[in-house]
Image (cartoon, helix red, strand yellow):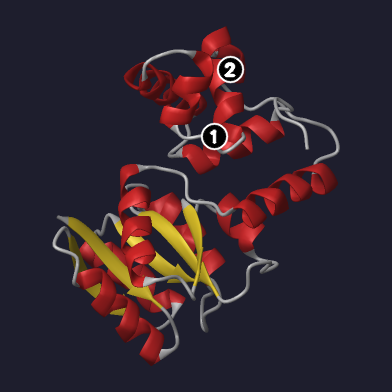
């Protein structure tokens, strides 16, 4: 069972998302929080696998809460929820350690699948969010900086890192490079280890910061 907590300052949304996620046979909602401060207390006590977090909350917003969770409870992955596709805080939330981003108008099936994907360490970014991430790197980071560990990657790992940064799945990378999917997964795991990244979102950030991928 994947343990999940949900945080949102709107009671109807909070109850609705908790009910949808909890109805899945493999997901267990172990708590709900109405603001970022309550969320931090809940994560500390419940030790969930995934925290589904609204980006805009009182007392402590979703970005600040995500940063604290990433630093203090690295085994808990964060899935950010927001009302707006171009929310100005999305970039900062991902940099704070969020593993994915989802709009609140998501269908029930998509929400459940998103929680599963984040729990497994998969990247969950919509096309518009990916474009925003790229735009932010080109405007905020005019000079690439080498991410620690980037020079330790093999040529194949660099090739796969570039593909991950383009948003390709393991299966798509395998098909493009003519290698088996388990081999791709192995290379991705090595890249994660060498770069000290928790998930594919952080791999994308490392690729852009290091100048491996341009806009």
Please identify the quarter of the rendering in which residue 155 is found: top right
Q: Would you call the spot at circle 2 few (<14 residues within 10 Å), some (14-19), or many (20 or more)?
A: some
Please identify the quarter of the rendering in which residue 174 is found: top left
Residue in front for this viewpoint, 116 or 209: 116
Name the residue at 44% across, 52% down.
70
List x then y, in percent, for residue 32: 29, 78
Q: Which residue is mark 2?
A: 158
- In the image, taking residue 65 as reference, residue 210 lies left or right, namely right
In the rendered view, tell whether residue 85 sits above or below residue 206.
below
Q: Would you call the spot at circle 1 few (<14 residues within 10 Å), some (14-19), or many (20 or more)?
A: many
Residue 154 visible in this rendered orientation of the protein = no
Residue 180 visible in this rendered orientation of the protein = yes
- In the image, taking residue 32 as reference, residue 161 lies left or right, namely right
In the rendered view, tell whether residue 142 sits above or below residue 136.
above
In the rendered view, tell whether residue 105 sits above or below residue 115.
below
| SS class, disc 2 | helix
Q: Which residue is mark 1?
A: 203
Name the residue at 86% across, 38% down.
142
Please identify the quarter of the rendering in which residue 164 is found: top right
Residue in front for this viewpoint, 32 or 43: 32
Check residue 101 in the rendering and tell me which mark sits there, or answer none.
none
| SS class, disc 1 | helix
Q: Quadrant of the N terminus?
A: bottom left
In the rendered view, tell whether residue 101 sits above or below residue 177.
below
Q: Please count the marks in the image.
A: 2
Are the two marked residues, 2 and 1, in contact with CB atoms closer than 8 angstroms? no
Q: Quadrant of the C terminus?
A: top right
């Amino acid at each position: 069972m994947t343990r999940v907590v949900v945080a949102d300052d709107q009671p109807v949304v909070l109850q609705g998302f908790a009910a949808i996620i909890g109805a899945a046979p493999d997901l267990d909602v172990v708590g709900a929080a109405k603001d970022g401060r309550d969320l931090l207390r809940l994560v500390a006590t419940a030790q969930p696998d995934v925290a589904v977090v609204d980006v805009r909350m009182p007392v402590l917003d979703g970005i600040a809460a995500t940063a604290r969770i990433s630093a203090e409870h690295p085994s808990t992955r964060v899935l950010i929820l927001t009302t707006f596709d171009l929310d100005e805080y999305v970039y900062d939330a991902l940099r704070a350690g969020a593993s994915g981003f989802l709009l609140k108008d998501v269908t029930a099936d998509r929400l459940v699948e998103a929680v599963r994907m984040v729990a497994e360490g998969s990247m969950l970014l919509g096309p518009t969010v990916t474009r925003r991430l790229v735009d932010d790197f080109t405007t905020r980071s005019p000079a690439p900086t080498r991410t620690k560990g980037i020079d330790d990657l093999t040529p194949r790992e660099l090739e796969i890192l570039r593909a991950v940064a383009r948003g390709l799945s393991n299966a798509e990378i395998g098909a493009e490079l003519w290698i088996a999917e388990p081999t791709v997964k192995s290379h991705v795991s090595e890249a994660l280890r060498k770069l000290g990244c928790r998930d594919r979102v952080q791999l994308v950030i490392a690729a852009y910061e290091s100048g491996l991928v341009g806009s």
